[in-house]
Image (cartoon, grey):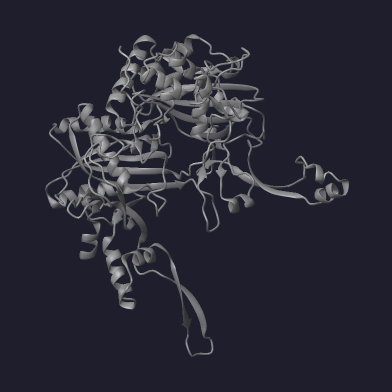
Amino acid sequence: MAKNDTLKTASVLAFERKLDPSDALLYASSWEKREDEQQWQPVAVREKSVRGTISNRLKAKDQDPAKLDAAIENPNLQTVDVATLPHNADTLVARFSLRVLAGAGTPSACNNAEYQAKLEQAVAEYKQAQGFGELAHRYANNLANGRFLWRNRMGAEQVEVSIRQLAQGKAIKEWTFDALSLSLRAFEDTAELKELASVIAKALAGELHLLLEVVAYVRMGRGQEVFPSQELILDPEQKKKKGKTLYHVSDIAGIHSQKLGNAIRTIDTWYPNENDEDLGPIAVEPYGSVTTQGKAYRQPKQKADFYSLLDNWMIKDQVPSKEDQHFVMATLIRGGVFGEAG
Amino acid sequence: MSEVKNLLVLPRLRVQNANAISSPMTWGFPAMSAFVGLMHALERKLFSAGINVSLSSIGIICHDFDAQTTEGGYIRGFHLTRNPVDKTGGTAAIVEEGRVHLDITLVFSIETAAAESEHSNMAHQINDIVAGMRIAGGSVVPNRSVPSHQQRPQWVVLDDKEEERAKQFARLKRRWLPGFALTLRDDYLSGHHQTLQQQNPEASLLDAWLDLSRLNHHCSMENEGQPNEKPAWQVQRPYRGWLVPIPVGYGAISDLFNPGEVANARDEKTRFRFVESLYSIGEWVSPHRMKQPEDLLWYVDNDEEADLYRLNNDYHLRATAQ
């Protein structure tokens, strides 16, 4: 194809997310009777007030012993939200649904018809050459290995993930995985995972409507603390009242859908890696950003970020490497507003 | 508005993270324009899926409302999302987003040339397509709070006979309880405006709108002139019912530009105009108070000569006639 000098990035360019999880709701159950839904009890979020101590790092001028004693005498009172399993249940049940939508690569808003046509052509070429198999395989892994449980997965004795394919409200297929036997570092390839990946790939390609119900059973011990999502509250007045607010939906503790989405799309192993260390997959983000590390792995300087790759592909006709194509497609599936400010 | 012949009911949709900031001045339930927008988008989607129907009006019944805000106190704050770090590794700016979880029933007036035997099948297909769409920016997720037989889409062909029609509607209404439907009360706004003008001739419609949007407390003396005289505070409510300020559409604040004339517009095929929100008063009415399906249906009622792009609902016409 001839080099296209006239094509410009659309100033309005937005994509809807194609992997659409619901919030996960948390229930408590006992491991032996985990599959009996009638026995599940909702995990409630309750408040507790604690008398804390001053333990933050002190500035040099405050390190004078007299001052420190004075500070320690002042109790650090705080009210926080907490959620635990009840004392008669040892298993956390987290349940959510995941809708996989077709039309990856079709923008929901784009004000440049030529650009859109180019984009659709590139996506069609990708579909033909690579298909959604690789991405679907990785998404399937992240469902099966229970990564979406985040801190609830750590220190768990046993984790079982059961995934059902729903149609008209009924399960038509079911897969069960032992989540702890699957690695968080690598993507594995078992027969069951292949099956799950193939339905996800079909749904992404638009060959089928897909709604998955994911239920994770986490054996963590009676009365153990569980970790629903924390709410971000900016209002300083409200913040003073309570140090931590946990998420709940009609009095059942929950994990935000955004957080589940982030775990499911933690598939990016293609980012540039200076020392060739094995850092494991990171979430698909335009700049490869990892919040917990405060670091962006795909720097625009190295031309490894989404925008550089997309612009090179669309405008300069430099087709990125296979790995980077996967990354660009995964970002389009993630969705977002990618237009260029005019 | 012509009499509605067919109704398509999509019951008890659970919508997650819908937009709760309905306009620059109101928050809470998503703006009605979001649902009318859904109707247009749905019609186009159905057309490309080979289902030829026309949708002309839409009604909403809300069964559950769970705004993502802080609880307690007079001042509410939205629960926001912490976004991934930016390219330098610093925290990304927080864009305020109001989110709400909804449990709603959508009612469309629908017309089609297809045979009646296909209706039920079409209703299921439409339900599937809606499940993959955004409603007011929120996702449709499976609803666990009601049994699945109550979530089946329904296509109702309304009878021509008045009596039979009333019976059909009564059956529908029962299924919509408990819930509240949003209706338009333009009449309250203009009525209250007149009341205010009697005291203060300069009172504007905005004063009337604000006055209806809040609770006014006023003080009066109980047992005046007697030994047990005491002041009493009362809430002043000029009208009964659950009134809310709502946006009802857009008014033009610029000329109408040709496609592509304005830089960075959303698309280059549609004419473009800058607008601002129009406001009115809405009332949440329990469906059992409604006399006919038209009471809860909203439709587009643009007045292009007056440069108004607005939505309308006819509930108040009948409510005042009673």
The quarter holding residue A244 reads top right
Left or right position of A86 against B259: right
Residue B81: horizontal and vertical position, in percent?
A: 52, 39
Left or right position of B17 against B169: right
Residue drawn at point x = 87 percent, y = 49 percent: A66
User: In the rendered image of this protein, does residue B8 appear above or below residue A90?
Assistant: below
The image shows a total of numbered marks equal to: 0
Is residue B192 at least partly visible in the picture? yes
User: In the rendered image of this protein, does residue A32 appear above or below residue B240?
Assistant: above
The quarter holding residue B107 reads top left
User: In the rendered image of this protein, does residue B283 appear above or below residue A255?
Assistant: below
Depth check: B140 or A32 in front?
B140
Residue A33: horizontal and vertical position, in percent?
A: 57, 27
Q: Quadrant of the C terminus of chain B?
A: bottom left
Left or right position of B93 against A221: left
Is residue A35 at least partly visible in the picture? no
Depth check: A144 or B139 in front?
B139
The quarter holding residue A4 reads top left
Left or right position of B251 against A238: left
Residue A334: horizontal and vertical position, in percent?
A: 44, 26
Q: Looking at this rendering, what residue extends furthest in the front direction? A: A5
Residue drawn at point x = 23 percent, y = 34 percent: B269
Depth check: A313 or A281 in front?
A313
Residue A129: horizontal and vertical position, in percent?
A: 37, 9
Depth check: A101 or B106 in front?
A101
Residue drawn at point x = 33 percent, y = 15 percent: A3
Residue drawn at point x = 28 percent, y = 60 percent: B185
